[in-house]
Image (cartoon, grey):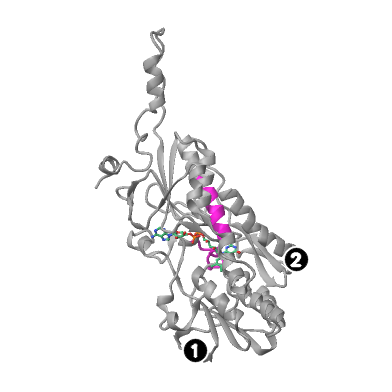
Amino acid sequence: MDRRRLLQVVGGVGAGIVGGLVPGALAREASAGPRPARKAPKPRPAAKSVVILGGGFGGITAALELRKAVAADRAAITLVDRKPRFLMGLRKLWIVAGVGNRADGERPLAALRARGVDVREAAVTAVDTGARAVRTEAGDLPYDFLVVALGAEPRPDLVPGFSEAAFNLYDPEQSEKLGARVASLSRGRVVIGVAGVPYKCPPAPYECAMLLDEAFRKRGVRDAIEIRTFTVQPMSLPVLGRKRCDEFEGRLQAKGIAFEAKKKLVKLDGSRAVFEDGTLEADVLAIVPPHRPPAVVKASGLTGAGEWVAVDRGTLRAGPAGVYAIGDVTDIPLANKMSLPKAGIFAELEGKAVAAGIAAEILGKAAPTPFDGRGYCFVEHGAGQAAAVQGEFFAEGEPKVEFLAPTPEGYAKKVEFERERLKAWFG
Ligand SMILES: Cc1cc2nc3c(=O)[nH]c(=O)nc-3n(C[C@H](O)[C@H](O)[C@H](O)COP(=O)(O)OP(=O)(O)OC[C@H]3O[C@@H](n4cnc5c(N)ncnc54)[C@H](O)[C@@H]3O)c2cc1C
């Protein structure tokens, strides 16, 4: 189906004003009576349809920033997500450790409607970049500009035995169940591990280990519970380099948390993690599954020959006309041959850059400053402390990144990170 036909059939995003005059303007013309001859007013450009796929860090930011920059008569903004509610990843760790609950951090995406964004709760089933249209379970949406912000999906199904044996550390329901399990644990071995790369928020599994260390200490059971971590990677946080990883792994060791690198998980078998080079028995297995882009992204050809969506790292343009991609669904190579970490802060900053780029195109303004790869996050160390990681990830040669010591101020900033975004986005 071509784009014009789609517009007729669906009456989709902003279709009432796409290609037409604003109704109020027609009414004013009719009632004004005779007037001196004057030059015909320049017709206003039709409103553009901007469709944003995914209501996470990237999609929400892109929608709200674009709304601020461009009035409704110049851009109709539709955001599509299959989930009705937003929950920040960092809260899942607080749920596991019993220091936070889900309800306090969840917000309805529908609240964005009050800010001029048309929110649709529906699964995206196809993207047709030729016809410039998105297919969803609730109908088709034609677009002038498309922002793909569909994230990265943890895929426990890629590890045999996962669902019977382990908790998926990145799933909100599972984090509640894992929280209940560790809250009643009084002895044994907890194993937290990374089964595949890339995965979102690289420090998260280690943060989880440190938060559990604190929780077990508070309950007075730490001496009877062993905490072990493993990763398939050569070191804990490779993008930070060997020296900083040694330092970080030293901090884990100081808390009595074992760390093992280069452990390739083959399967989970009851209470055993089976690696290429041995097995590990556990009372609780909390695993970060391998991640993949949502199936629709690959099936629609947006990843090309690669695994993730390739973009221009400054503009976040993804290839087909009018298409941008941001956040975890993308792969942005760095000078040291690694990739930009999958993190909410980058999805958010990319969302801002894309909103500025689309606004400039719609309003006929100069292109904005490109996204520069600067970012930060706060790594929780337990006991009310967090360490800031901050730097320039697009620096020549290798990322210029600082990894500061954990402090109470760092922890306060982490708590504030969630609070200020929930307030700014949902009110
Ligand atoms: C435990 C944990 C802790 C974290 N801590 C931090 C932190 O401290 N700081 C930080 O910066 N980042 C953190 N992150 C990472 C952060 O959550 C992600 O990097 C971020 O969410 C990526 O944003 P995004 O917009 O690319 O994708 P997401 O936020 O994942 O949003 C994608 C959206 O697309 C929707 N979607 C997917 N497929 C479809 C479909 N077919 N149809 C319709 N909708 C679909 C999903 O429902 C989802 O809402 C953490 C993550 C985890 C798991």
Task: Decide: is 70 above or below 59.
Answer: above
Is residue 388 in sight in this rendering?
yes
Q: Position of residue 213 (x, y in %)?
A: 67, 79
Within 10 angstroms of label 1, few (less than 14), some, or many (20 or more) residues?
A: some
Tell me which segment is drawn in magenta.
Answer: 330-355
- Relative to 20, is 259 on the left or the right? right
Q: Which residue is drawn at 72% across and 67% down?
A: 404
Task: Decide: is 114 above or below 73.
Answer: below
- Relative to 387, is 264 on the left or the right? left
Q: Position of residue 184 (x, y in %)?
A: 60, 82
- The first of marks 1 and 2 along the sequence is 1
Look at the numbered disc 2 and give the secondary structure of its residue.
helix
| Numbered mark located on residue 408 in the image | 2
- Relative to 256, is 75 on the left or the right? left
Q: Mark 1 points at which residue?
A: 271
Q: Where is residue 16 in the image (x, y as percent from the top left)?
A: 35, 35
Look at the numbered disc 1 and give the secondary structure of its residue.
loop
The amino acid sitting under disc 1 is: Ser
| Numbered mark located on residue 325 in the image | none
Q: In this figure, what is the number of numbered marks?
A: 2
Q: Residue 98 versus residue 350: which sits nearer the camera?
A: 98
Question: Which marked residue is nearer to the observer: mark 1 or mark 2?
Answer: 1
Q: Which residue is drawn at 31% across and 41% down?
A: 11
Is residue 169 in sight in this rendering?
no
Was residue 342 drawn as part of the magenta stretch in this picture? Answer: yes
Was residue 238 drawn as part of the magenta stretch in this picture? Answer: no
Whether tag 1 and tag 2 are in contact, CB under 8 A, the answer is: no
- Relative to 275, is 40 on the left or the right? left
Task: Decide: is 128 above or below 306.
Answer: above
Q: Where is residue 205 in the image (x, y as percent from the top left)?
A: 58, 74
Q: Does the residue labelled 1 lie within 8 Å of ligand 1?
A: no
Q: Quadrant of residue 74?
A: top left
